[in-house]
Amino acid sequence: YAAHKEQLKTLKAFFRKYFPDDYGRMFRQRSVKDNYVNYIRWGWRDKFDDKVKASGRNEFYAALKTKLDSKKDEYSPEDTAVYEDIIQQMADNSYLLKLRISENGAIPYQLHKDELEKIIDRQGLFYPELRDNKDKLLSLIEYRIPYYVGPVRVSFEKDGETRVNSQFAWTVKKPGHEHDRIYPWNEWDRNPDESVRVIDRQQSANDFINRMRNKCTYLPSEDTLPKHSLLFSEYWVLNEVNKVRVRGHLIDRRVRDDLIESCFKKKSKVTIEDLRNILRKNGESDWATVRITGTSKPDRFLAQMLAWKDFGAILGGITAYDKPMIEKLVLWITLFEDKRVLREKIVCSYGSRLSEEQINKICKLSYKGWGSISGTLLTDIKGYDQSENARSREICSVIDQLRMSNHNLMEIINYPSYEKSVKEFNEQHREPDMSFWKRIDGLAGSPALKRGIRQTFRIIDEITGIMKCPPVSVYIEVPREDGEKGKATKSRHELLSELYSDLSTDPEFDGVRASLKRENDKALQNDRLFLYYTQGGKCMYSGEPLDINSLNNYQVDHIVPQSLIKDDSIDNRVLVKAERNQRKS
């Protein structure tokens, strides 16, 4: 404040001396763009010209520098030093700073609190009400509305109806407090007196849970499971392990079950080496060298059963009686980052069942993320058993089908009996008055994805109106989102290495394989070089060897001609000799 005062005094004196005609435009007129008045915007806020926007620091500095530079050759030696000092302070972002700026966020609130305490103590000598309300005043600085309470919902009466200020708020107030304002001293975690608390914390937390949960991909009316819930993690593991192949054959279910019990329920990450040890345990003679494929990562499984591992250790094992409790605990851990709220919910619901030590260990757990499917899909959608040893017309759930067979979810859900069950369930639980656009809102996916779907259907409506008939097919291209980057993707070098590992016994490719080992991912971004290796170093049309040092002399041709379809993907291109390509044409 003092620095601003001195800097302003110097600047005004400078303007009076060198820019007397512009003094009023800089320091008095509200209609001038990027002057001091519109930079500060202090007082007379309702009288500022709406056509002239408030100036930011950079805009004000730029305008001031332009003005000062216009006469820098006329300044006296003393004033030249003043000019250079002003320019340097602007370069350092320390000139005429406001009191309320974003940089203040770097100051710990404890300093503001200490300052406020001193102000209250000194001014309290003259205004006793400040000392009487010291705790309340300090709480205005200390208190933050918890995230699970959400935006504060304000109720008001209009046209004889009780309305709220925001459709995005979920805060629930206690009966009799609907119109009370929320202050730190009447909010639930600040005041031990239950009678004066305004917010219904339990109901607000429950509403927060319901808002946070996504909808099932196959059953839009059902909520998805937490990613690390017992049921979803079991599905996650079975869905991946069921398609693992050992020596080209689907994994034996006896080996699979042993792998789950011995590794997935005991370790955070399960590797290919763990599977080899299980194969050795189950009598596989060449367990160390046998070819294993089908895992999400080259050296390990992506699926995890963390909750099984964690709660198995905390509870000394997981029984059928424990599972409903654990599912709720995993849900709360996923939702509530605030450990105080988590502890309170655990103590309230299971305080008599869990020891203090167990509660402490549970509160230290951290689970994040949501699955894409619901518990209803896994347990309540049923169809005919498709496993090898199934008895005729036997009915079982999706999760049971995963347990009893080597199928994955996509296979199971597309069997006629399961497909019919999904369709019937959705028909029974569809909201009759739900609009088409509201159904899109209920889909699992980011707001950007849903926006793209809405725009697509608007374009379809427009095309249908012009063509007088709907399009036969619709394709939506969805760019990869930030959260999906790196998931289950392989570099070009990894893809080629796997390709040549399958040809390890073929001496015809020894030279190309040896050359590939010297390449890196950056070099393989060259499409011609990548095509050279995918084709085994040979022309795709003639089968003749290609010279890796003369790749620019060859031509890249489209497999499906561009006259038929515009497809420039690497899968639709081949590297060929020019004469062979011309002969083809």
Image: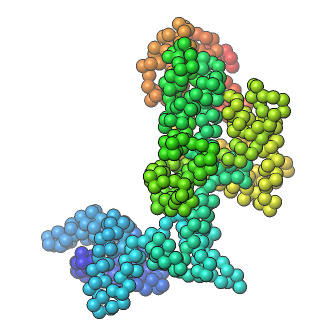
Q: In this view, does 104 lie to the left or right of 491?
A: left
Q: Name above or below for residue 113 compared with residue 226.
A: below
Q: Is residue 332 left or right of residue 105?
A: right
Query: Percent x, y for residue 53?
Result: 46, 74
Depicted 397 relative to depicted 569: above or below: below
Of residues 191 and 302, the one nearer the viewer is: 191
Q: Which residue is drawn at 55% across and 48% down?
A: 369
* Quadrant assignment, res 64: bottom left
Task: For residue 204, say whether it is visible.
Answer: yes
Q: In this view, does 3 lie above or below 88?
A: below
Q: Which residue is drawn at 24% across and 64% down?
A: 88
In the rendered image, the quadrant that contains the C terminus is: top right
Q: Residue furthest left?
A: 77
Give percent across and percent down for residue 578. Answer: 59, 17
- Say which quarter of the image contains residue 301: top right
- Taking the image as shown, residue 290 lies to the left or right of residue 561, namely left
Q: Quadrant of residue 211?
A: bottom right
| Residue at x-position 58% and y-position 80% | 177
Residue 360 percent location from the top left of the image: 44, 53
